[in-house]
Image (tube, rainbow, N blue to C red):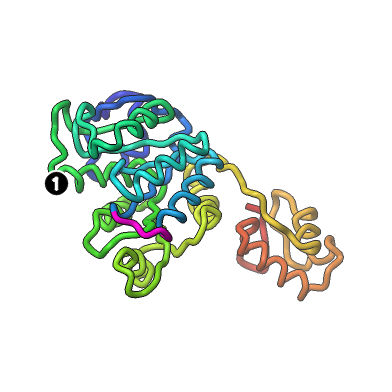
């Protein structure tokens, strides 16, 4: 229940958290680093490939994948996390004893072994249509951000994205071809600046480090970033204290102009931040 210490702290912060939910499997402290991956039940091959790749890459970084165990993108995301020996959480729209869709019985069992299946609906509850919008708020509520892979304009993933925005969570979307129904929703989210355009897990991790690490107060595992010789010089001379660009240029033995170009490149890569007065600091 919401009064138990095991109740996820991040879920308590949403507008309408479930007073109680039922759980099969186990939730761990690492699940505070969760990202939801959602999308259409009828994905294109493009959507399936990217959902699998993004889910696998995030799972390998220790990030828990949250989804709804529906056909299509949800199932791809769960399976990819499991394949990567990562953790995954399914939020379902029925009782824990009613597996829906039925063909996901094996997936259901795998998720309980390396994560958790949760539901706010009591045992015996059937997967009625009105249950799914309610469960979508929990998918986003458990997550630091929501990745929408593919969805039509009226898809449930659009509801999940809307919940995420209301909950002050990050929303990411994979762009798709104009005219493809499965990309109409994602393209609209990007066009309206309601979602950050992403093409890889690296894009998501960069946003998490820049925007969410200060809130969490913990380090999310960093990915490897390729640096030029000049960028390495700059990183090596910087420490925990902000430095003026002239000081950095002197220490790195670079001209001010070369130093500025490489500082901006490092900022783009999410390794440093620019402060007022031409000051720069490591992230």
In the image, farthest residue toward the right? 253
- Residue 45 among magenta residues: yes
For the image, the number of numbered tags is: 1
Q: Is residue 187 left or right of residue 1?
A: right
Quarter of the image where the N terminus is located: top left
Residue at the spot 73% in from the left edge and 59% down from the top edge: 227
* Residue annotated with mark 1: 129
Up-down relation of residue 23 to residue 224 (above or below): above
Magenta span: 42-46
Q: Does the rendering let one see residue 237?
A: yes
**Closest to the observer, 278 or 6:** 6
Majority secondary structure of magenta residues = loop
Q: Is residue 203 left or right of residue 278?
A: left
Q: Does the rendering let one see residue 166?
A: no
Helix, strand or loop at mark 1: loop
Residue at the spot 46% in from the left edge and 55% down from the top edge: 49
Residue at the spot 39% in from the left edge and 71% down from the top edge: 177
Image coordinates of residue 117 in percent, x first then y, are 32, 31
Image coordinates of residue 262 in percent, x first then y, are 72, 67
Image coordinates of residue 139 in percent, x first then y, are 31, 43
- Image quadrant assignment for residue 166: bottom left
């Amino acid at each position: 229940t919401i009064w138990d210490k095991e109740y996820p702290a991040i879920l308590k912060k949403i507008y309408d958290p479930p007073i109680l939910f039922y759980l099969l499997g186990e939730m761990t402290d690492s699940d505070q680093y969760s990202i939801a991956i959602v999308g259409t039940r009828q994905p294109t091959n493009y959507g399936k490939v990217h959902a699998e790749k993004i889910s696998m890459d995030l799972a390998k970084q220790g990030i828990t994948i949250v989804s709804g165990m529906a056909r299509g993108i949800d199932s791809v995301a769960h399976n990819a996390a499991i394949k990567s020996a990562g953790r995954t959480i399914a939020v379902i729209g029925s009782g824990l004893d009613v597996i829906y869709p039925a063909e996901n019985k094996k997936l259901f069992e795998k998720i309980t072994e390396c994560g958790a299946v949760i539901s706010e609906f009591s045992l015996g509850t059937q997967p009625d249509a009105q249950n799914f919008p309610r469960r979508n708020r929990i998918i986003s509520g458990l997550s630091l951000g929501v990745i929408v892979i593919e969805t039509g304009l009226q898809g449930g993933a659009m509801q999940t994205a809307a919940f995420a925005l209301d909950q002050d969570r990050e929303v990411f979307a994979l762009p798709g071809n104009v005219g493809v129904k499965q990309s109409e929703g994602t393209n609209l989210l990007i066009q309206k600046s309601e979602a950050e355009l992403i093409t890889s897990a690296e894009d998501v991790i960069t946003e998490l480090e820049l925007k969410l690490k200060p809130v969490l107060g913990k380090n999310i595992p960093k990915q490897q970033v390729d640096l030029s010789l000049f960028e390495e010089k700059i990183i090596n001379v910087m420490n925990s204290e902000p430095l003026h660009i002239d000081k950095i240029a002197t220490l790195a033995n670079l001209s001010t102009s070369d130093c500025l170009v490489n500082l901006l490149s490092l900022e783009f890569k999410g390794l440093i931040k620019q402060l007022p007065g031409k000051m720069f600091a490591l992230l």
